[in-house]
Amino acid sequence: MTLSNLASHQKPPAVDPDQRLHMKMIAHHVWQLSNRFPDNLFNVYLIEDVLIDAASRWDASTLLKRLANIPLSQVALTHCHPDHQGAVKRICTTRGIPLACPEGDIASMEGQAPMVPRTAAIKLMELGFAGPAYPVQRSLRDGDEIAGFRVIHTPGHTPGHVMYFRESDRVAIVGDILRNNHPITGKTGLYEPPVVFTLDPEENWRSIRKLAQLRPTLVCFGHGPVLTDMEQFDQFVARLPS
């Protein structure tokens, strides 16, 4: 039995009072970690004992503190961008756990290819937030399973971008196929990811529609607070270009 399967038969991990202040349960066996101010800037989630995304390199020490004494079996990325892979190396090496990465983004994660798109914005993000390259131990493909969530390939933002979806309660962790805050003002609301960070916006529209077809009840973003108002989401999807 894997650590993830074992965790599903256990009580949630015990956390001390300081950790509890920075870990919010948002669904069964799903927590959102607060790792920087303002909240919801670079979101990180814990599904059972699997960490989803790893924020920026500046978040490594904070995340390690938040996760002290919390069982971890692996880090799994939604995609390889500086604000999602930044703390990967420190977390994986410190905790002695493997990295799982979407197949189409492995070359970027391992430093064999640049992060895409190759815009000035991405290059600036790399300088400010990216962590070092790190070897991937598990390649994630469409239909794989992570701690009870199905891996769904949702390309467009990056070639390999994936989201994680749990059929039992229709919780979706969607990375950056869309966001729930404005990238400049921080105001809460649904937005497409900025074009300067997105390889193929039209492909990303198709990925958003793929999410809509799943009829999620809770959507967890890489940026912005979680969303439970599915009417708002449906209206957003209806306004996407055809």
Image (spheres, rainbow, N blue to C red):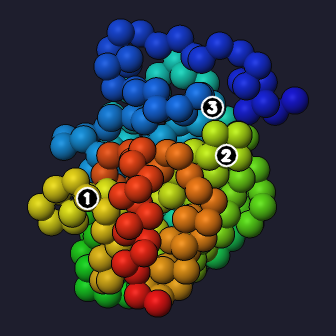
Q: What's the CA distance linking mark 2 and mark 3?
A: 15 Å
Q: Which residue is mark 1?
A: 189
Task: Report how far apart the C-alphas of labels 1 and 3 lie in the structure.
Answer: 30 Å
Q: Residues within 10 Å of mark 3 (few under 14, many from 20)?
A: many
What residue is rendered at 51% in x and 58% in y? 174
Which residue is found at the position 22% from the left and 54% from the top? 188
Question: Which-is-in-front pick, marks 2 and 3?
Answer: 2
Q: Which mark is residue 166?
A: 2
Q: Image height check: is 241 above or below 188?
A: below
Question: Against 2, is 16 above or below?
Answer: above
Q: CA distance from mark 1 to mark 2?
A: 24 Å
Is the C-beta separation of discs 2 and 3 under 8 Å? Answer: no
The disc, 1 or 2, on the residue closer to the chain's N-terminal end is: 2
Residue at (59, 56) in percent of width and height: 215
Q: Earlier in the sequence, mark 1 or mark 3?
A: 3
Q: In the picture provided, is 80 more to the left or to the right than 140?
A: left
> SS at mark 3?
loop
Which quadrant of the figure has residue 179? bottom left
Image location of residue 72, percent across then percent down: 61, 31
- Name the residue at the right extreme: 1
Q: Residues within 10 Å of mark 2 (few under 14, many from 20)?
A: some
Residue found at x 44% / y 53%? 230
Q: Position of residue 22 (x, y in %)?
A: 34, 26
